[in-house]
Amino acid sequence: MPRLVCISNRVADPRKTAAGGLAVAMAEVLNDSGGLWFGWSGKLVDAYPGADGPALHLHRAGPVQLATVDLDQADYASYYVGYSNGVLWPVFHDRLDLAHFDARAVEGYRRVNQLFARKLLPLLHPDDVLWVQDYHLIPLAAELRALGCTQRIGFFLHIPLPPPSILAAIPGHDWLLKCLCQYDLVGFQAEADLDHFGRSIAVEARAQPLGEDRWRVFNRTVAAGAFPIGIDVGEFRALAEGPEAREMHERMASEYSRRKLLVGVDRLDYSKGLPQRMRAFRALLERYPETRHSATLVQIASPSREDVRAYTDILHELESLCGSINGNFGDLDWMPVRYIHRTVARARLPGLYRASRVALVTPLRDGMNLVAKEFVAAQDPQDPGVLVLSRFAGAAEQLREALLVNPHDVEGTASAIHVALTMPLEERVQRHAALLATVRATDVHWWCESFLRRLGEAESHESGTPWLRL
Ligand code: GDG
């Protein structure tokens, strides 16, 4: 078995359960192959110690080697804040209005990808298989290839890929596409993203389709596929049996014994549709007066990227909406919305999901959305809650038995929430059984295995092919 080298913006300690499902799954494949995980340490330094940039930190986590580098303030500002989260995140979520195109940011993005390539290359073995994660590192294969790396390299995009007309708005989008095509396999969350990729490389680079989602383009062959990410169902159900989840469930179930609980769990991000969700909840209370005093929405909005301006704007909008709903509808003995702007311990989440009759997962755009899958996994199959899911989440391609909504349609979402709150037990059980079967069949282990199997089958890098810079 070749050694797996995983590269991501941040490196998690795979032995810590708090790291979540992705880290657990990565740890499993990395453990099996005695693998290497490379990325940013999460630490910032004022200046690098020498001309060659940051020092490399090597740690062992069981059989897995962790290799990290620190970033200086300037690289962090341009690579992470400026380009990754100021250009790629908004545009890939169809929010051109929130993008800040700045030539210095793309330079920093390129510089950090070069730095990663330079630091990683000496650690590689000839038959390693490399798996690069997410939008921060799109040019990494190109930078590694430029240094002579011929190993097989796969890439997985955790966020959506926009349609060609939106992608084309990014200055240098042709460079991004060319960089993607330096991978041997490019993985997307959903068929819609794969379709956008095929159309973009056809229009921008006259890619020649070879069939089975393979193309001849930029003088090489690239394969792509949809590999919807899943959760670690076993790990999540074990967490649900733990003392913290049980205590949470008992506390919420007794406190809300006379009321139906709705839950939302999101990073506080403009892609998650939180203001639209609050407006839909307000419309529910207006249109269905019987829900007043009987429905409570617990919204956890965990802090995220607070150094990006658009995030403070969304925070203020959300606080004001929650305040006005509670002010207009609340009573001495009932608060319609409990809004929590803090991170809740992961061990407690399954208990909260299980105590809730309805989950509101209504992003305006989302690569997949793991909360939808966690909610399904945490339910009691004899008396399950109902998932209200945005049609614009990647998860909607798989979770067809959820109540699918258009989050821009406030009235339509309010009426779907009402259907969820009043759904008979028999229908809840049927829908949940089908959803759970899908969540189990396409868990995170399935995701890892199917991506790596396909990468193994992909044509490896043609070493004789010159790498042309745009
Ligand atoms: C990206 C893509 C894709 C949330 N609040 C708390 C908390 N969480 C956990 C959830 C879930 C995870 O964070 C969020 O996962 P999502 O999938 O919803 O979203 P992103 O963070 O945007 O992730 C997304 C994902 O990558 C994987 O490919 O699905 O589309 O955007 O696990 O439970 N966890 C804890 N406290 C919180 O307050 N402990």
Image (spheres, rainbow, N blue to C red):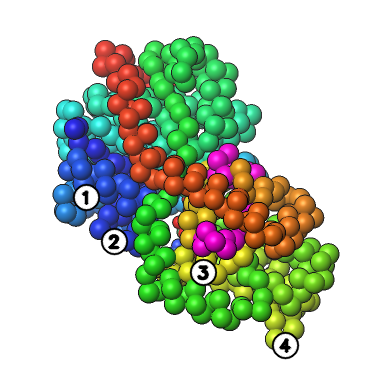
Q: Which amino acid does label 2 sit on?
A: Lys
Please report the bounds of the magenta region as a residue range. 379-399
Observer-side mark, 3 or 4, equals 3
Q: What residue type is labelled 1?
A: Leu
| Residue 248: % across, % down | 47, 75
Would residue 376 be visible to someone looking at this image? yes
The residue lying at 35 percent from left, 39 percent from top is 448
Observer-side mark, 2 or 1, equals 2
Image side of residue 384 versus residue 49, left or right: right
How many numbered marks appear? 4
The disc placed on residue 332 is 4
Q: Work out whether residue 159 or residue 313 is closer to the camera in this orientation and state it.
A: 159
Q: Work out whether residue 82 or residue 205 is closer to the camera in this orientation and state it.
A: 205
* Placement of 284 over or under 155, stated as above or below: below
The disc placed on residue 66 is 1
* Placement of 460 over or under 344, stated as above or below: above
Work out whether mark 2 precedes mark 1 in sequence or the reverse, and give the earlier one. 2
The disc placed on residue 352 is 3
Question: Marks 1/3: CA distance?
Answer: 33 Å
